[in-house]
Image (cartoon, helix red, strand yellow):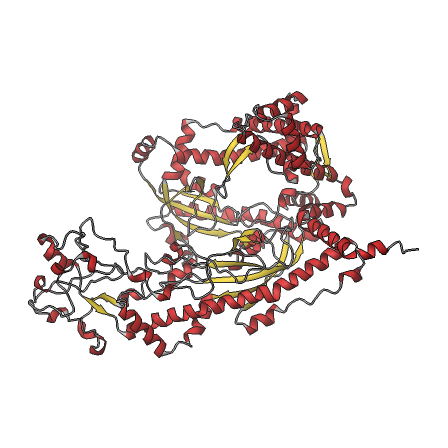
Amino acid sequence: MSNPLAVFRKNRNYWMAGLVILAIMAFVVAPAIEQLSQAYRTGGGGENAVVVRWDGGKMTMAEVQHATAQHGRLVRFLRALGDKVREAGGEPDVPGAGMNFDPQTGQPYYSIGINMVSDEEMICRSRILATHAKKMGVQLTDQTADDFLEAFCDGKISAEDYEKTLTETTSGQLSEFEIREILKTEIATNIAFEMGRSALEQTTPGKMWRDFLKLNQTAKVTAFPVFVDEYVAKVEGSPTETEIQAIYEDGIKRAPNPNSSEPGFVRRYQSNLEYLQANFQDWVEREKANVTEEQARAEYDRLVELKMMEVPAETPSSETPATETPATETPATETPATETPATETPATETPATETPATETPATETPATETPATETTPTETTAPQTPATESPATESPATESPATEPAGPASGDQSQNLNSTNVRLVALVQDAETQAGSPAGESESVGAQPPAESTELEGESAQAATSNTPPPVVQPPQLGESDATPPAATGESLAQAVPTMRTRTFEEAKDEITEQLARTAAVPKFEEVLTQAIQEEMTPYYHAFREYQAFQQSGVDASEAGELPPRPDLKKYAEANNLIYGETGMVDAMQLSRTPFGLSQMPRDAQAFSGMVASTMMEPQVAPFIPLQSNYFDQAASQMSGRAIFSQWVFWKTAERPAYIPDLTEVREEVIEAWKRVQARDLAKQAAEAIAKKVSTAGSEPWQSTLSATEQALLVETDPFPWMSRLGNQPDVTVVPKLDNIGEDFMKAVFDTPVGQTGVAPNAAKGIYYAFRVVEKGPTEEDLRDRFNADPQKSGPLSIGRVESQRLFAEWYESLDRELGVEWMIPINSL
């Protein structure tokens, strides 16, 4: 008799492969649900644990999971159905359906008339709003859902196509009954949402004028800060147990926020990131030591031959050593009126077609037009150029071999694990210009760092150290049929085109060495980062995922084998001139205060993109998946005149889900929050006392009120408006000399007349400013004229939209209070 397990043993590899695939899918697809499930299971409720309850309903964990999945299936079905309707020449005829644009990416998409986001919080919110709509008298039937579907199909979809689309998109897991129930909930939610929003979006002429002033009126103040921290130790007494409990219950609704005055005790999701960092300029400095003088001189000779070392003769020719002066150059002060250099051709004999496009023959000044006593024109002399001449951007920059990438081809920037190279970020031309690159030298770089000027163009020694490149001067170009320029322009051309000289090797040596070092550093820089990913991190990632999948499949641990040791990235960093580091267990806000946290992940990197601080603080990012990011330091680049940036390769090694701590864990934080509230009153009283003294002082109020030490903290701002716009998004203006000011500060300042004093806190109420308004502007008459001259009023309207969103959020909160909404865990904080 054959062994009953023979069949299994014979096909064991296939069975195991299937189990591994299922385990991996479960690990990737449902991490967020699993995290939430674990949070509730720790309370002993499991799937029957209540997620949220309100007056008129509740949702358990199982209901939330099922409703979220079914809502996602309905969204997929309606999107596919909408595509078929449009292919048939129709258009879904329901409110809210049609073409829209993603506000973050700007990409177009088709909405389907219902909420398209399928996550736990949105599903719960929809149920709550539907209950609110029902209490308001909104009654929906199955016919309402059927009418929605009929209008959505627009008469273009047959019953057969409808059923086929439903089966294909939902695998038969969504019934007609569930479609009607979900649609009734979503339609009721939309009705409640629109009723609440329409009541808040009211714009009156008076409000329009006030919002206009917020964007256009400015104020200038002197201000003295009073710090709340200095008064915490002066607080007497202790909070009662009732006060402690109240502060705790309020604080577990939110996570800590340094920009908020309200305490937060929710522990955010945290993770530890292990990384290798490469600062490109460090690699350039190391390569400089390998550049010999012979290499630098050979490169110099090549650039001279290409006429790329020529600059306007701004300094006396005597400063140029005779050995470095080319034979074609004659000092301007020694050129006789009748002498023409042998290598030059008079402008009257040189057709435009004979001048190579890559050369700038700035030295070809007709000798007959230059008197012996004439001095060399300065670079500020504007060339009188005919309208038809070639633009000045035609420089030799396109021919220099130095512009060729020194590393692999730059076409593909994909970041998949099988990539043959680490693709360094291709920064935009603006970043290069900010770093000191001459305009017009934009490079198409995909596999190397952003170069400065990749060629040493003709520029003076003075301009070489400046962030602003010298102007490129070209003589007028003749038309193809014009062999002789107009006689009237001959003298002006002689005055417009400066005499040129060739930079000496000593003048250009440092720049040539820098560029040769950058060119040599690029492939080495790429190689060590590529090897770190391909040879150290990726093999371990695959081994870890396979081991983890076996473990989660429930198979005997012996089948999983041994997990290989983790690669020693610190040792790799020491051997390859990289910087090794770990972040420790940090949350998104803590990480965002570092360059690494602010670095950007390429959009196509394993489907993860964006800022590291926000992207990596999500449980969806699997541990040990190799990723990379880059950071361009604009401030340092502008100061140094070169593009300064860093590159990281990294992975997540540990994580801790978000959770709500017990009172015993945060009791000291709660007491500290109570003390800060008391300290604010003391700080405010101190600021008010200072403001009162300043208001009654003489001609120098601050000097007579503050001590010499305190006067060092006094600041005088530049004029600033209440709000500023970034695109169409208005926000409170950032005033550089003041710390994180908000609406309270702005309202106090703009409500205070010129010459008078006041007191206002910053946004976090950590500082109370005693201030005096120095001036306001423009005049009211000027502001009225500008207001009346603006027919669109887009600025005030944008403020109205933002305020409507805030009021709607407050309406949401009041609705929660009205319905007694109680979240067992603040999902929106996780």
Quadrant of residue 477 within the rendered picture:
bottom left
Residue farthest toward the right in the current orientation of the protein: 1
Q: Is 128 drawn above or below residue 27 in the view shown?
A: above
Please indicate, yes or no, whether residue 100 appears anywhere in the rendered image: yes
Q: Is 189 drawn above or below residue 347 in the view shown?
A: above
Residue 454 located left or right of residue 672: left
Residue 203 located left or right of residue 19: left
Residue plotted at (38% across, 68% down): 515
**x and y, in percent, of residue 10 in the image:** 81, 57
Residue 354 located left or right of residue 368: right
Residue farthest toward the front in the current orientation of the protein: 1
**Residue toward you, 783 or 325:** 325
Please indicate, yes or no, whether residue 211 appears anywhere in the rendered image: no
**x and y, in percent, of residue 18 in the image:** 74, 52
Residue plotted at (32% across, 73% down): 509
Quadrant of residue 395 within the rendered picture:
bottom left
Q: Is 704 drawn above or below residue 513 in the view shown?
A: above
**Quadrant where the N terminus is found in the figure:** bottom right
**Residue toward you, 11 or 521:** 11
**Residue toward you, 807 or 484:** 484
